[in-house]
Amino acid sequence: MGSATTQALAASTQTLAAATDVTLDTARELFAAARAVTESSHLSGALADASAQVEARQNVVAAVFGGFSQDAQSVLKTVVAERWSSASQLVDGIEELAIRAAALAEPQADIAGELFGFTRVIAANAELELALGSRLGGEDAKGALVDKLLAGGVSDATAVIVSSLVRQPRDRRVRQMLGRATRVVADQGDRVVATVHSAKPLTDAQRTRLRDALSRRYDGKISLNEVSDPAVVGGLRVQIADDVIDGSISARLADLRQKLAG
C-alpha cells in the first residue's frame, strides 16, 4: 500500500467514524459504490484522477451516487477528495470502508469470529470453494448461494460482508477476501486477531491465559480464532499477522532433528 493510499484511507476512515447514523444500508451502499467503480473504467478514471479539481470529483459522486444516504455520500466525497496510489487501491479503500461500516452497524456481533468460521467451512469443502471461486457462473448466483448458506447462522453484518465480497471478487480468492475482511473488522474493534492451532479444543482457562499473555505481548485486545489440528501434536501454534509462535511438540521435534543433523 503506497503512502498516498495510507493517508487517503486514514482520512476516509475518520469521516466514517464521525458519521452519526451508520447502518447496514450504509455498508451496502459503499459495497455498491465499489462495484460500480470497478465495473466502469470511465467512472474509476474520473474519481481517481488526481489532476482533476476536487470539487469536480465530488460532483461526480453527487451525480452517480446521489440516491445514497448522506453518510455514504460524505464518505465517498472524502474518498475522492484524497489522493490514491492507483484506481484499484481507491476501490480497495471503498471496500474496506464498507466492511468497517458493517462492523460499526453491529458492534456487539462477533463478525470476525463468524468470518473466520465461514473461512474454515470453505477450506474444508473443495466443491464449495470451487463454486465460489470459479469464473464460470454469475457473481449474483454466488452471492445467492452464500445468502442461502449463511441464512440465520450469522449476524446480518457478516452476511452483508460475505455476500458483497463474493459478488465482486476482482480476481481474488475467496479465502483471501475473507481473511482481509476479518483483519479489517478486528482493527475496527481495536482488536488483534490470533489464529491458534491446537491438537484439541482449548479449555476456558487456557483461553484466558493465552489471551492475557498475547494481550501483554501485543498491547491490545485479542480475538482468538481456534483451529483443531492433529499435526500440532501437543502445545500450541499461534499466528498473528506475519508473526508465528510455535510451541507445539512437533515444532520442537523438528528443531531437535535439525540440530542433530547439523
Image: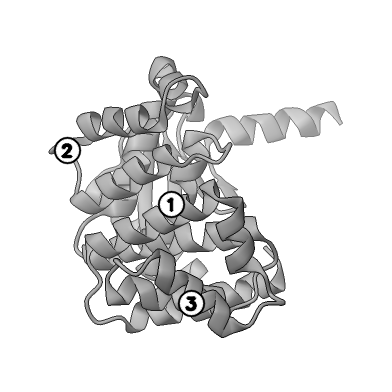
Image coordinates for residue 241, horizontal then vertical, percent: 56, 54
Residue beneath the point at 34% across and 84% down:
18
How far apart marks 1 and 3 lie (CA) works out to 30 Å
In three-dimensional space, the C-alpha distance between marks 3 and 2, rounded to whole angstroms, equals 41 Å
Please state if 32 lies on the left or on the right of 111 as rendered. right
* Quadrant where the C terminus is found in the figure: top right
Q: Nearer the viewer, mark 1 or mark 3?
A: 3
Q: Is residue 29 visible?
A: yes
Q: Which mark is residue 181?
A: 1
Relative horizontal placement of residue 229, taking residue 4 as reference (left or right): left
The amino acid type, in three-letter code, at marker 2 is Gly
Question: In front: 143, or 43?
Answer: 43
Q: Nearer the viewer, residue 182 or 149?
A: 149
Q: Earlier in the sequence, mark 1 or mark 3?
A: 3
> Residue 96's spot in the image, x, y percent?
46, 60
Label at residue 153 = 2
**Disc 2 residue crowd, few under 14, some 14–19, many 20+, Cα 10 Å:** few
Name the image quarter holding residue 4. Answer: bottom right
Q: Amino acid at mark 1?
A: Ala
Q: Quadrant of residue 13?
A: bottom left
Q: Earlier in the sequence, mark 2 or mark 1?
A: 2
- Residue at the right extreme of this rendering: 262
Q: Is residue 69 above or below residue 36?
A: below
Percent from the top left, x then y, of residue 59? 48, 77
